[in-house]
Image (tube, rainbow, N blue to C red):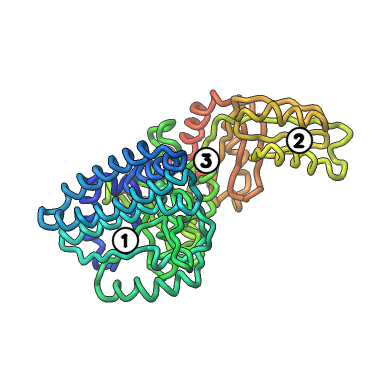
Amino acid sequence: MKFGGTSVGDAKAIARVVEIVRGRLPQRPIVVVSAMAKVTDQLLQMARAAGAGDRRTALTLARECRERHYNTAGELLGTALFTQFHSDLGTEFEELEELLRGIAAVGELTPRTTDHVASYGEVLSSKLVTAAMSTHDIPAVLLDSRDCIVTDETFTRAAPLFDDTNAKLKELVAPLVEGGQVPVMGGFIGATRGGVTTTIGRGGSDFSAAIVGAGLSADKIEIWTDVDGMMTTDPNICPDAKRIKVISFDEAAELAYFGAKVLHPATVLPAIQKNIPVYILNSRNPACEGTRIAARAPHCKNFFKAIAAKKRITIIDIAAPRMLLAHGFLKAIFDAFDRHRIAVDVVSTSEVSVSLTVDSNEQIPALAADLAKLADVKYEGRKAIVCLVGENLREIPGISAHVFGQLSDVKIRMISQGASEINLTFVIDEDQVPAIVQRLHRRFFSDLDQAIFA
Ligand code: ASP
Ligand code: MG
């Protein structure tokens, strides 16, 4: 069971976590927690301030962070326990402040030191949650993730060393579970073989949960967050968007590009590879069944799983009547994108031209100037990518006819299907997004019982 930053964001949220875990005790849970909401950002801010020699700002921020943890602990724990816990937290904060003073004195912040500072968020939250569970009669045991998540030395985005990690998990975590205890671990953090603190990348607690769950062959992994799960489309555009009950890993991965903020599926890959289902659940609404991510989703009677849209897209059209199919020409084009460090999303080619989309940004004019040495270049912003995702696209003929049949009055600038077999993508003017998404959602999602395949 992994609880994200908002799920442990204050005393009330942590109290909810305690009850959610209580409900799962018969299933012998392991708990992985993020830092309290925004704490990692604040720690990184402290580290940067200290690195710039601004000791005062760094220590002021640390004091605020200390207050927040004390206040939360005070609300959660009875007086006797709070006194003991207060001094325990105090020791952590003294160490943190010592570290910040050291960084400020040297005036240099290395990735290694950054990780050391950032790790306090999960160290503190895991202590807090363990104490809260203990006072409420849950047999919680704190486990320092740095003792079991073994990583390489790529500080700030370290990669787990799975063999070492799995061995440690079996040695340190499994016996606790078997003994009827509930291990509580901080997500996001680990350590090198030599014991130096590392972090595994922002948002990494989901990854931690998947590493632990996969390493111990859990029956399932629950990612507790503050929404009911993944939705058929953005509820801000379509208030009648529905919760997706089951989604395949591939479908979820396609949607991640569109900023499905709930979870980046790549982070749960270790679980998916072992066929362990991953659930996204809402700690504010624990009765809701959430969304299950499975290696393979069962057949869905709906055409699609979801409709996503991404605005702030620019289309770049490159026309080169004589050159396009010449050997090496596309390479020259992509090299230009590479030099400007601009990522391409949708690509479509013809005999004489190639169109690409990129996220709108300030570097485009410079890129266009570079490309103009090779061919005629035009670019146009205020576009949007609309993407329909679903495993059914692999098998069912004529789906695109159904989609584009709905769009006979719309100027479609690019179309792409086939790259992943499970997404149908097209590009339109940005201001048309709400109307088009609503129209498609109404057609493909409003009446799920409608026999659209008949
Ligand atoms: N606390 C870390 C972060 O904010 C990891 C996580 O929350 O997943 O990036
Ligand atoms: Mg997160």
Q: Which residue lies at the image location 30% right of the left edge and 72% below the top edge? A: 177
Q: Which residue lies at the image location 69% right of the left edge and 37% below the top edge? A: 340
Using the image, tell me which numbered label, if any, was put on residue 31: 1
Using the image, tell me which numbered label, if any, was put on residue 258: 3
Quarter occupied by residue 78: bottom left
SS assignment at label 3: loop
Residue 24 is situated, as x and y percent measured from the top left of the image, at: 26, 62
Q: Residue furthest front?
A: 105
Q: Is residue 298 visible?
A: no
Q: Nearer the viewer, residue 135 or 245?
A: 135
Classify residue 169 as left or right of residue 368: left
The residues tagged by marks 2 and 1 sit, at their Cα atoms, a distance apart of 50 Å
Q: Which kind of residue does numbered mark 3 sit on? A: Phe
**Which residue has dot 2 on it?**
354
Q: Residue furthest left?
A: 79
Mark 3: few, some, or many residues within 10 Å (few <14, many ≥20)? some
Quarter occupied by residue 178: bottom left
